[in-house]
Image (tube, rainbow, N blue to C red):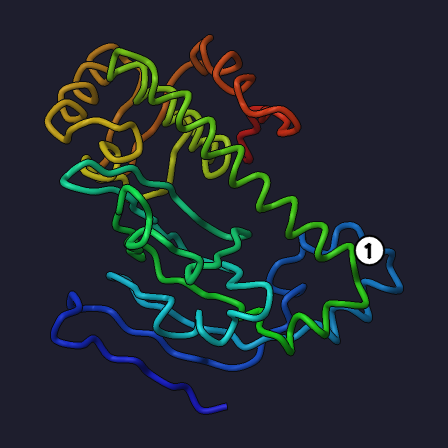
Amino acid sequence: MKPRSYGASEAEPRGYRLEVAHLCHVLLSDPDLGAGLSDGRLARARRECIAPEVIVETGYWRPEEAEGEAARDGIGLLILDGLLVRRVGTEGRYGAELLGPGDLLRPWEHDGEDATLPFDTSFRVIERLRLAVLDTRATARMAPYPELVSALVGRAMRRARDFAINMAIAHYPRIDRRLLLLLWHLADRWGRVTPDGIRIPLRLTHTLLADLVASRRPSVTTALTELEHQGMLSRDGHTIVLHGEPPGEFNATAASAPDGLSPPVLRIPG
């Protein structure tokens, strides 16, 4: 299949580009999705579960105007690689969530303009995205394997749990504690053990961190400086390295997730 490119319109920030690359084998690109299948069924599912693959370059993205429409009647868009920020808010007050490999999107389900309290939603790709478009055809191919649908539902629940934890973190009155808890929460998913500490290999700008902890950018800059002076973290550009052990409040914060959503266990992959 010849790639299709979607160039940025004059109203879109420069750098926005989307390509439909080819068909991908979903379970080869996302092996964890098939963890519940037996060996024989897993081999068949790897062959049969294919979907269009979409590449989205860095910059602002309007998924509901592109391949999101193709997946509207299917399961949605599955992130295979890359990093995305979803930002929600109004009148200069925003919240944000980070989305990465394994997360499922249904961006057309947005009623912000029609809500009693209208809000804006935007997406920004900060690391080149590779997506599987789980449209009606791809969904039909997955139908003989209910374990896959169960796994996708579990991921949606994980996203809800993570969002609830972010809300709990945002209730801490001190910005430095909010920030430290958030960074350890991000390290649970993306952190890497290095000789210097736990490195979070994400481009975490002060503005993004401010949205994630419900604060203002100047306050986040001050809090990062203070945490660095205390030896709790160090910075290499926008990359942050955590030192020592997670703060004691982490477990209590995680335990505040809604009923039915298990609190996370801090697991830093090597």
In the rendered image, the residue lying farthest to the bottom is 2
Residue drawn 54% across the image and 77% down it: 52
In the rendered image, the residue lying farthest to the front is 116
Residue drawn 34% across the image and 74% down it: 18
Q: Quick one: label 1, few (<14), some, or many (20+) residues within 10 Å?
A: some
Instruction: Report the front residue among 144 and 248.
Output: 144
Residue bearing mark 1 = 37
In this picture, is 36 found above or below 231?
A: below
Instruction: Report the front residue among 117 and 53.
Output: 117
Mark 1: amino acid: Leu
> In the shown orientation, is residue 176 left or right of residue 33?
left
x and y percent of residue 152 in the render?
64, 52
> In the shown orientation, is residue 263 left or right of residue 123?
right
| Quadrant where the C terminus is found in the figure | top right
Q: The residue tagged with tag 1: helix, strand or loop?
A: loop
x and y percent of residue 42 in the render?
81, 62
Is there any visible trace of residue 196 in the rendered image? no
> In the shown orientation, is residue 131 left or right of residue 241?
right
Where on the picture, by quarter, is residue 203? top left
Where on the picture, by quarter, is residue 239? top left
> In the shown orientation, is residue 241 left or right of residue 162?
left
Is there any visible trace of residue 227 in the rendered image? yes
Residue drawn 57% across the image and 80% down it: 23
In this picture, is 229 found above or below 89?
A: above
x and y percent of residue 22 in the render?
52, 82
Residue drawn 62% across the image and 75% down it: 136
Where on the picture, by quarter, is residue 232? top left
In this picture, is 156 found above or below 246?
A: below
